[in-house]
Amino acid sequence: MKLDYTQTKPNKKIDMNLNLLKKGSHDWLVIVVFIIIGSLIGYGISFFKTPLYEATALVTTNMHLNPAGPVNEFMLDAQINHIGDLYFNKTVVQKLLETENENGLNISFDELKNIASVERRMLSSLIKVRHADPVIASQIASDWAEILYKTLQDAYPYAVKVSIAKNKLLLLEKCASAKPSENNDWKQVCEWINEDDIEQSISEAEDIIINNSDRTFGLSDYLNISQWQPAEIPTKPISYHRGSMVFAGGVIGFILAMVFFVLRNKKHD
């Protein structure tokens, strides 16, 4: 018997999908019911999710930018980024942990890393802290910014001292290597220096740099820590989970409805 290859066989998967479009089909109603049930379940679960609040404090810096001088925009950019990195400096974090412990809040460094983030905004370095308690979030952020501000204020005089010593050292080394008879500019640059005292002056400048560099926290003399701003107590959570949980529940309900249709068709087959 010759087969007629022009005949088509119904595709059960396509047929199942087309059933949803048939007039009088109640499959759409089933889908809606599943979606509603899933959304309601997601809505109920959302009450068990703790909302998160974010508090933001900041430290503001002012820096002298002179295109014709030693400070350029790249140095400025690097120094401001460095201020943000100092939020997680070992000394700053240790002072913060001690402060929070005195305030009755027992928190570890690992917990701080999980709830905090640093952000740069123009000349300001922001510390953002997320916590389920808005008061605690504000407290940690404010204490953190204040501690960093005071630390930088204490470090600045050492930064100036080291910067002066470095500039003096460069000049002394230049004068030490130059010969007055061969350099007409020697007298203009080095006439204030006694030739016999150059080596001693170099040694003194090196001692200043070695003994004070750790106290500068990497700051530069052209940096000015102008102010710090405490965090306000946040009133609205940044993440409440409710909307996302309802949406996820609805999606799961839709998927379960599709699974229901597949199982139903297999049972009829």
Image (cartoon, rainbow, N blue to C red):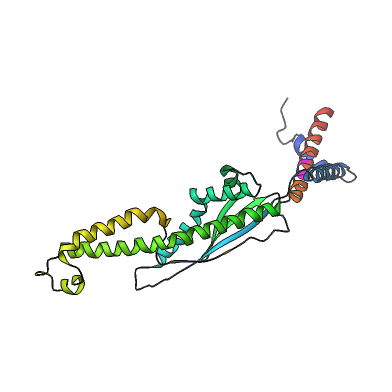
Is residue 89 something that shows in the picture? Answer: no
- At 54% from the left edge and 56% from the top edge, which residue is drawn? 147
Residue 266 drawn in magenta: no
Magenta stretch in the rendered image: 248-252
Residue 120 point in image, percent of width and height: 53, 60
Q: Residue at horizontal 27%, vertical 64%?
A: 168
Residue 227 position, x and y percent, is 54, 66
Query: Furthest residue to the left?
Result: 181
Q: Quadrant of residue 40?
A: top right
- Is residue 144 in view? yes
The front one of 195 and 25 is 195
Where 125 falls versus 252 (above or below)? below
Residue 158: x %, y % from top left: 40, 60
Principal SS element in the magenta part? Answer: helix
Instruction: Determine whether, in the image, residue 222 is placed left or right of residue 102.
Output: left
Task: Look at 17% across and 67% down and name the residue there.
Answer: 194
Instruction: Please state if 155 lies on the left or on the right of 40 as rendered.
Output: left
Q: Name the quadrant of the C terminus.
A: top right
Tell whether 221 sits left or right of 205.
right
Closest to the observer, 19 or 223: 223
Q: Is residue 250 magenta?
A: yes
